[in-house]
Image: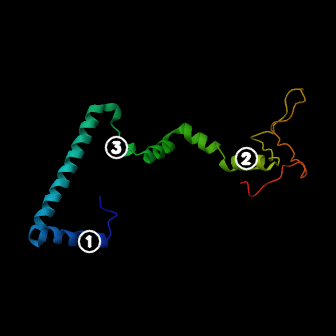
Amino acid sequence: MFNDIGALELVTIVVLGILIFGPEKLPKVIQDIAGVVRKIRAFSDSAKQDIRSELGPEFKDFEFEDLNPKTFIRKQLSENEDLKEIRTSFDLRKELTDVTDAVNGTEPEPTPAAPAATTGGTTGGPDLVKKPAQPAAEQRTPFDVDAT
């Protein structure tokens, strides 16, 4: 519960406790706080048991830690067979290089898994897959540094 409290914080809490409650009352205050923590834990455990019993046998393997979104996603990705198949078939590096090539205007290398795109039809329209050639330097609009 208090895994992130360091030695300096603990010493500070003890010194503040001695200053606020005094050395005579401090052990009683610590016992009272420990009792409250125990009661809260017991209440939490009984509430968890009540929820499990009310949910029924369909949720017998339900864990409250699964309500944390990170834990839930990690569990679903590791146990779901369909997602494992998608994850193994998806090559993120290839997708990123394809996008980079498209942005830079270079032709991506065709792979056996993904054949090169062909232009369909005989309309003779522009090829929307290929990036148009850059206009000549004299055709570009002048860039004003002060305007931006």
Residue 63 higher or lower than 14, as above or below: above
**Disc number placed over residue 64 in the picture, else none:** 3
| Quadrant location of the N terminus in the rendered image | bottom left
In this view, the residue farthest toward the top is 122
**Disc number placed over residue 12 in the picture, else none:** 1
Viewer-nearest residue: 65 or 59: 65
Residue 122 higher or lower than 7, as above or below: above
Task: Tell me the residue at 64%/42% (across/down).
Answer: 89
In this view, the residue farthest toward the front is 146
**69 horizontally vs 138: left or right:** left
Disc 2 and disc 1 in contact, CB within 8 angstroms? no
The location of residue 23, given as percent across then percent down, is: 12, 72
The location of residue 57, given as percent across then percent down, is: 31, 32
The amino acid at mark 3 is: Phe
**Disc number placed over residue 144 in the picture, else none:** none
**31 horizontally vs 69: left or right:** left
Q: Secondary structure at mark 3?
A: helix
- For marks 2 and 1 on the same chain, the one whose residue lies earlier in the sequence: 1
Task: Tell me the residue at 20%/45% (across/down).
Answer: 43
Task: Tell me the residue at 69%/49% (across/down).
Answer: 96
The location of residue 5, given as percent across then percent down, is: 32, 66
Query: What residue sits right under mark 2 in the picture?
Result: 99
The amino acid at mark 1 is: Thr
Task: Tell me the residue at 74%/57% (across/down).
Answer: 146
